[in-house]
Image (cartoon, rainbow, N blue to C red):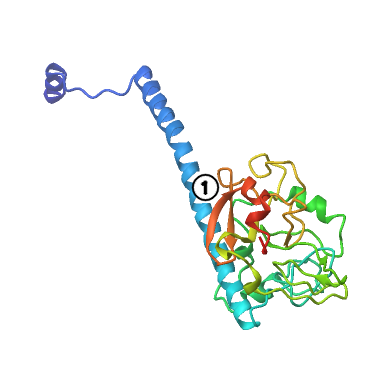
């Protein structure tokens, strides 16, 4: 009793927070959270892009190994219009009669053959792809982020079909290979493109149709995505990876092999 009275007299009596003090603390915490959340979100996006770049480096390594093992020849384009081809670079079709994506030719020699290797971590919206795939039940939607550069066949002066590249063409009765040696300035030519996959403005800068197969057609045009802060990750024909703006992808000098 005497100790308690002594504490009161000396001003050391315990007391709780007042309501005002509690509100001030809550307000400070809310301000700090508001400041930190954008930083954390930006850090998460940077980590996801780093994972995307790493995936594209792995795919580039797989492509290089494929080309080296096949007399300098690129694999097929994996087009939705050409039907399944064993030489396609990616086995993307959802029909159970087709091989799984892990069996795609360019990843067979890699240690990591997970389906996640073909899809950017920030590519999370399937709604537009599902709608696209509903019109093509034989193939299904394209649930991956990347595609291989491919130009339409042309004819030479004798009317013979010519493959401008960059993929080989083994479809519709055609067998036209394309070799890495035919690419001029490979360090400046997009080989694997990260395409638009949703209707979101942060992904789809031009309002174009979403990715629907493994073929990137710059002259169509199929725009690059803008999901990485206005840029897409691309693997060049010398197998290095860089982020580039979607407008970079519109310039055919950056993808047409003979330019």
List x then y, in percent, for residue 71.
65, 83
Graded by Cα atoms within 10 Å as few (under 14), some (14 to 19) or many (20 or more), the crowding at tag 1 reads some
Instruction: Please identify the quadrant where the C terminus is shown.
Output: bottom right
Q: Which residue is mark 1?
A: 45
- In front: 40, or 62? 62
x and y percentages locating residue 134 in the rendered image: 85, 55
Identity of the residue drawn at 58% across and 65% down: 186
Residue 125 image position (x, y, % from top left)? 69, 49
Residue 89 image-quadrant placement: bottom right
Question: From what the image shows, is residue 189 above or below residue 7?
Answer: below
Secondary element at tag 1: helix
Residue shown at 57% from the left, 59% from the top: 188
Residue 171 image-quadrant placement? bottom right
Q: Is residue 9 left or right of residue 80?
A: left
**Residue 170 drawn above or below residue 57:** below
Image quarter of the N terminus: top left
x and y percentages locating residue 199 in the rendered image? 72, 43
User: Would residue 223 appear left or right of 39 to someone viewing this image?
Assistant: right
Nearer-the-camera pick, 134 or 80: 80
């Amino acid at each position: 009793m005497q100790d308690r009275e002594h504490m009161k007299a000396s001003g050391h009596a315990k007391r709780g927070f007042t309501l005002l003090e509690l509100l001030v603390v809550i307000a400070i915490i809310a301000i700090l959270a508001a400041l930190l959340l954008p930083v954390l979100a930006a850090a998460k996006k940077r980590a996801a892009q780093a994972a995307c770049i790493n995936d594209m480096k792995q795919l580039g390594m797989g492509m290089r190994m494929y080309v080296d093992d096949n007399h300098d020849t690129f694999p097929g384009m994996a087009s939705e219009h050409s039907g399944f081809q064993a030489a396609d670079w990616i086995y993307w079709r959802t029909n159970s009669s087709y091989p799984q994506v892990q069996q795609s030719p360019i990843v067979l020699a890699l240690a990591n053959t997970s389906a996640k290797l073909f899809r950017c971590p920030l590519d999370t919206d399937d709604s537009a792809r599902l709608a696209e795939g509903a019109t093509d039940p034989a193939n299904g939607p394209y649930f991956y982020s990347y595609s291989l550069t491919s130009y339409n066949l042309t004819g030479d002066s004798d009317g013979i079909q010519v493959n401008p590249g960059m993929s080989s063409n083994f479809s519709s009765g055609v067998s036209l290979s394309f070799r890495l040696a035919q690419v001029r300035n490979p360090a400046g030519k997009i080989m694997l493109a990260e395409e638009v996959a949703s209707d979101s403005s942060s992904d789809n800068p031009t309002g174009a149709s979403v990715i629907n197969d493994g073929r990137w057609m710059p002259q169509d045009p199929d725009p690059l995505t803008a999901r990485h802060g206005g840029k897409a990750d691309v693997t060049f024909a010398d197998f290095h990876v860089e982020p580039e703006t979607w407008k970079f992808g519109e310039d055919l000098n950056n993808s047409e092999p003979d330019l």
